[in-house]
Image (cartoon, rainbow, N blue to C red):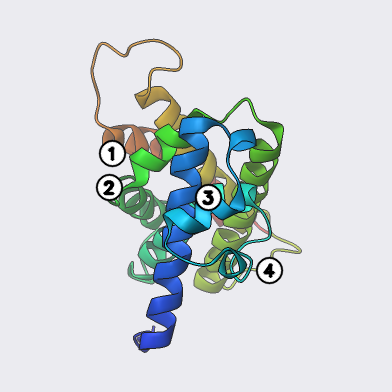
Amino acid sequence: MAEQAAPGRRERKKAATRAALAAAALRLCSTHGPDAVTVEQIADAADVAPRTFFNYFTSKEEAVVAGYASSADTLLTAFAARPDDEPVTESLRHALRAVVTDPGYLDRVQALRALRGHPAIVAHQMAAFAAQERALADAVVARTGSDPARDLYPTLAAAAAVTGLRVAVQHWLGDHGTDPRSPSLTQLVDEAMAVFDAGLRALAGAPA
């Protein structure tokens, strides 16, 4: 694949502002609760004017879950960087590893878990998951040249990866009890993708 040009100064500044607003929104809302936090407080914490907030987000809920966009970018970039002739499931496994080892990822996950009781936040999370799956499915289509209108594989592979990531994180955090093996999160990602691997490879080889 051709290398993309590095973002210019303006793009880097905009990305930094967006990241600062997202981090402030997540930090404040996970600490005080979304109902107790205003857009003005988020903007102030990010050292920008309140009107600047709305250049990037339509609501504080959208800003809170914006970290998923960062994770999606990491996932897609890591997937695209893998060799074109590598099995898709193997590329997905490496891409998921890149996500869970990305600095700040687990801090974002922990903060968002504190907001699971807020329906508006959960709705935005579900939308972010769906967008991540669609983007990853598009990347699989680009890799394989398959037709998603006739072939289940790209969408199923993307859904398997995103679900595998979620399940691995939940297991690592002890949602279903303490695992006596004390596995690392990267080990759990490997396990999750191994569960899907045989079936996904079989589907990839099946007639459309």
Residue 92, position as x, y percentages in the image = 41, 53
Decide which of tag 4 and tag 2 comes sooner along the chain: 2
Q: CA distance from mark 1 to mark 4?
A: 31 Å
**In this view, the mark in front (4 or 3):** 3
Q: Amino acid at mark 2?
A: Thr
Mark 3: which secondary structure? Answer: helix
Q: Amino acid at mark 3?
A: Gln
Q: CA distance from mark 4 to mark 2?
A: 32 Å
Residue 147 is marked as 4
Residue highlighted by disc 2: 101
**Rendered image quadrant of residue 146:** bottom right
**In this view, the mark in front (1 or 2):** 2
Decide which of tag 1 and tag 4 comes sooner along the chain: 4
Residue highlighted by disc 3: 41
Q: Is residue 17 visible?
A: yes
Decide which of tag 1 and tag 2 comes sooner along the chain: 2
**In this view, the mark in front (1 or 3):** 3
Decide which of tag 1 and tag 3 comes sooner along the chain: 3
**Left or right, 73 with reference to 190:** right
Quarter of the picture containing the N terminus is bottom left
Q: Amino acid at mark 1?
A: Thr
Residue 102, position as x, y percentages in the image = 30, 52
Quarter of the picture containing the C terminus is bottom right
| In contact (CB < 8 Å): disc 1 and disc 2 | yes
* Residue appearing at x 44%, y 35% in the figure: 111
